[in-house]
Image (cartoon, helix red, strand yellow):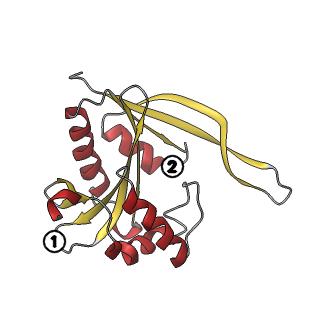
Amino acid sequence: MESKIIIAETERLILRRYKKEDIQDLFEYLSDEEVVKYEPYKPQTFDETKANLEWRIGTDEMIAVELKNSHKMIGNVYMGKRDFEALEMGYVFNRSYWGYGYAAESCKALITRAFSDGIHRIYAECAPDNERSWRLLETLGFQREAYFRKNVYFWRDEAEQAIWKDTYVYAKLNDNA
């Protein structure tokens, strides 16, 4: 059973499917306002996190990132299937583990695996003011392909008006395809 839930391993990380025991670690970062600042959801309550974990357990698109040395789950990478042999990538990590290269290490392993499985293109979207995110994408070899102005909103203001946001789109092509 254990071998089926592991997707990849790196020097420091285990990339795997979610399991019920991840609830506390998941809540730790999904309830952090700074962590979810650019996500299309607000900080989550424990009950919301429990429901979210059930969804994560049931999908193969959300990949938990666990530290090998402590077995603490510190974040996730999203690899969503899209048309034309493409994946959409995203990542969210516990703020206590920012700046140690865990996001780059996990994304690099998953990108390598996806390209070896025949994926043609991986893309990611992020807010222009989320510099940590787009700098990571550039470090991973992604190129900025688009800057969409006021193309999406997640929230409305007190007058029920949409709060529009800009989006950068980055992509990396499979050089071996």
Q: Which residue is mark 2?
A: 130
In the picture, which quadrant includes the C terminus?
top left
Q: Tell me what residue is drawn at x 58 percent, y 54 percent.
A: 40
Q: Secondary structure at mark 2?
A: loop
In the picture, which quadrant includes the N terminus?
bottom left
Q: Counting residues from the N terminus, which is met first, the one under dot 1 or under dot 2?
A: 1
Q: Secondary structure at mark 1?
A: loop
Q: Position of residue 111 (x, y in %)?
A: 27, 40
Q: Position of residue 174 (x, y in %)?
A: 27, 26
Q: Tell me what residue is drawn at x 43 percent, y 48 percent.
A: 133
- The circle on residue 69 is 1
Q: Which dot, 1 or 2, sits closer to the camera?
A: 1
- The circle on residue 146 is none
Left or right of 42 in this view: 164: right
Task: Give the CA separation, mark 1 to mark 2.
Answer: 30 Å
Q: Tell me what residue is drawn at x 56 percent, y 59 percent.
A: 37
Residue count near mark 1 (Cα–Cα under 10 Å), binned few <14, some 14–19, many ≥20: few
Left or right of 157 in this view: 103: left
Q: Tell me what residue is drawn at x 25 percent, y 59 percent.
A: 16
The residue positioned farthest toward the right in the image shown: 159
Res. 25 image quadrant: bottom left
Indicate whether 45 appears above or below 177: below
Q: Position of residue 128 (x, y in %)?
A: 55, 42
Res. 66 image quadrant: bottom left
